[in-house]
Image (spheres, helix red, strand yellow):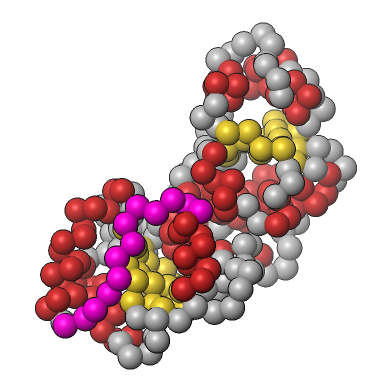
Amino acid sequence: MASTRQFALVLGALGDFILTLPLLCELQRRGGLALCTRGAYRALLPPALEDLAFIDLDSAAAASLFADVAALPAPFGDLLRGAIVQAFLRPDAGLERTVRRAGAAGLVWHDPRPTAPPHLVLRSFSAAGIEPPARVLETPVLRRREGNGQALWLHAGSGSAAKTLAPDWLAAAAQREAGRWAGGTIVSFGEADLPLVEPLRAAFRARDLAFTVLICPTLRELRRRLEAEAGAFIGADTGVTHLAAALGIPTTAVFRATDPAIWRPVGEVRVES
């Protein structure tokens, strides 16, 4: 497998995608990689993956992968022929028939929602038949290009209400850190987090705490701002927390509903529950 070209199909949310990066980097290093995933994720590729063949999962061509068609449009024919397909989704019979007809050399399914350890990163290496690098779970896969930021960065929300941090809890955490950060406090919100904006404002106001709000940035802007401004990060088990850790920012990841033994971010991470 070491010299075989690879084709990765990654369907998951932001945190899931970031947890695939250690394996994707290793596959690219060993023999070359084509990647089909959400177009926005291209802004998050590390230098080791910037030159790979990239296909937007939301494109019409990518939709043909799931249409159980006899012949795939370009560029899939050349990319799949002779490649090992690493599919980060539950087994799909139609997709399997399509990639086999395209001449793929093999197909590996990666369970996107395991319910027991090992960690998702270690599980992905095992499924691919590759020994993981030493300290892979402690090594930031993106690592920011510039120096340390000077702000405390907070992110309360998550795609799941069970994982979301209470505004009062987050305000109390910010109060404990008050005075340590010359760049102040930044609180980010994604689209699903908008109902938290006013409750969080109220919780900070009650403690006479100032903060800057960042609402619904693009992934490119989010990465740029985190790299430039964050000196430390506190967040729920969510994609933004995974991104902060992957950039090498000292991160506190607070797990309310999921198992950190499976889902903890990769990097310099302290886990709380």
Looking at the rendered image, the quarter that the N terminus falls into is top right
Q: What are the residue bounds of the magenta stretch?
A: 208-220
Q: Is residue 110 above or below residue 80?
A: below
Q: Quadrant of residue 158?
A: bottom left
Q: Quadrant of residue 145?
A: bottom right
Q: Observer-nearest residue: 233 or 68? A: 233
Left or right: 79 with respect to 139?
right
Q: Residue at x 21, y 58 (%)?
A: 196
Left or right: 154 with respect to 72?
left
Total count of labels: 0
Q: Residue at x 74, y 26 (%)?
A: 80
Q: Observer-nearest residue: 240 or 144? A: 144
Looking at the rendered image, the quarter that the C terminus falls into is bottom left
Q: Is residue 211 magenta?
A: yes
Q: Position of residue 223 (x, y in %)?
A: 51, 60
Q: Residue at x 30, y 71 (%)?
A: 212
- The answer to whether any part of residue 136 appears in the image is yes
Q: Position of residue 171 (x, y in %)?
A: 23, 76
Q: Position of residue 28 (x, y in %)?
A: 77, 48
Q: Observer-nearest residue: 129 or 233? A: 233
| Residue furthest out toward the top | 70
